[in-house]
Amino acid sequence: MSNEERANVVICGGGPAGLLAAILLDEAGVKSTVLERSTETDPWNTRSYTLVLGERGCGALERAGCLDRMREVGTARKFVFFYDGTTGDLKAIPKKVAGIGFSRSLLVESLEAIAVDLPNVSIQKGSGVSKVVASSDNNRGLVDVCLENDSIISATHIIAADGKWSRVRQSMPSLEAQATMEVCPSFGVAMVTSTVPEGWKTDGTYLIKPSSTDDQTLFYVIASPLPGDGLSISMVCYDETVDKYPWLAPPADKNTVDADAGKKVYTWEDDYSAKPAGEKQHLDLSDHLEALFQKEMPLFLAAIGKEALKSARINRRVTWLRMTPAESGNKEATTTTYATDDGRVALIGDSAHCMTPSLGEGCNTALESAVKLVDCVVSKMKENEETLCAVDTMSGAFVQYGVSRPKETQLIQEMSAARSTLKK
């Protein structure tokens, strides 16, 4: 098989799903280049988040042969702890399947450490994608990835792992036409502590509810121990919360405009607030939270300390990506797909099925999608009795993945979105 007949892949996005796809493709003998906008892994801050890999995520890591290594760097999550913030009572509920806790940055660093040593993987940092277009070399049917520095990388196939505001998806009319960003009536207030409270266990996630019983629970708190030390704290609120506590109002959507395309362009930063923007707002929010926690969960406040409240940031309302059939050319589509009709571009992770954080399945499902896509590639190679993946084989695999995967992910998205609305 000549080089021109052999498939090669550019993976746009060096997050967990993109890196796992590269690791799996290497195992199948397929060369890939991972493009990541960041020059280095983002450090932990209030814009970061913790995640717990459960059955789906751990299964994906096992398929890639790196589960044991990930267990060594992550933190075991065996329990859900229900903590009474007023009395200090603790109830531990064992999880059916023990998970692994990570900060996102730690998971990325760990997968990258594996991928960088593989013979068929190349990682280019500081390479932000601006758009994807058909190559001027029409005879080979290549796809060009145009970077923010005006350079171009060509490949036979593209995997979009560049998040819910995917530039790759936005470049493909047949994919972007299916996409609608749904806004849910809930949001989070993020905080972080430098240490785990004395006496707290690190092998589980803590759920703390307010003591008031005179009306609905208008907020609750999730506290997750970080690998190493510290807590990631998220106060989950709803639009109804703001009715009672106006000072918790989240900021409006922050939209940016692509001057060349004349349309709105979003990035992951748009999910997060710059609020409080000044020292006064900073202190006002901290003071309000202190008074609320002192009333509703005083022992929790004592455990984390007042200093933690100074790190508080109010995030924007959560959003999720709804993909529905859309007209393609002169054909009226009846099926949602995560791939272009020619099988040259496929979406995985948040670029295909971004979901709200309420079920904690976003990263798990993203990793699973990387596995599902590459499993389609391996299956097609076996079907065609290939040891090296041909261009047409890869295209067929992308199309197969594109129509089969939405049926598995959309139910999870719907369930997660339902949990992002206050129960009446």
Image (cartoon, grey):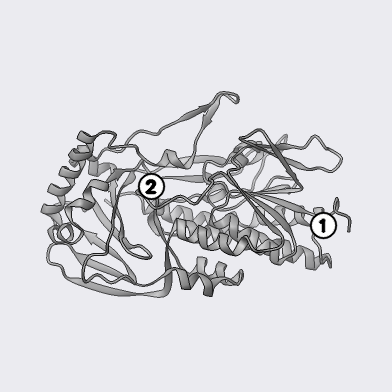
Q: Is 145 rendered above or below residue 354?
A: above
Q: Is residue 110 visible?
A: yes
Q: Secondary structure at mark 2?
A: loop
Image position of 14 (left or right of 30)? left
Q: Is 275 rendered above or below residue 336?
A: above
Write the residue at 48% across / 29% down.
Answer: 256
Could you tell me the amino acid type at mark 1?
Ala
Q: Is 208 rendered above or below residue 139?
A: below
Q: Quadrant of residue 258?
A: top right
Position of residue 12 measured from the top left corner of the image (x, y, whole percent) = 62, 47
Q: Which residue position holds label 1? A: 390
Position of residue 374 measured from the top left corner of the image (x, y, whole percent) = 67, 61
Mark 2 near mark 1, Cβ–Cβ under 8 Å? no
Q: Residues within 10 Å of mark 1 (few under 14, many from 20)?
A: many
Image position of 393 (left or right of 37)? right
Image position of 340 (left or right of 383)? left
Q: Is residue 243 visible?
A: no
Q: Which residue position holds label 2? A: 47
Near-viewer residue (381 or 145): 145
Position of residue 276 measured from the top left corner of the image (x, y, whole percent) = 27, 37
Could you tell me the amino acid type at mark 2?
Arg
Write the residue at 25% across / 43% down.
Answer: 240
Q: Secondary structure at mark 1?
A: loop
Image position of 109 (left or right of 313)? right
Q: Earlier in the sequence, mark 2 or mark 1?
A: 2
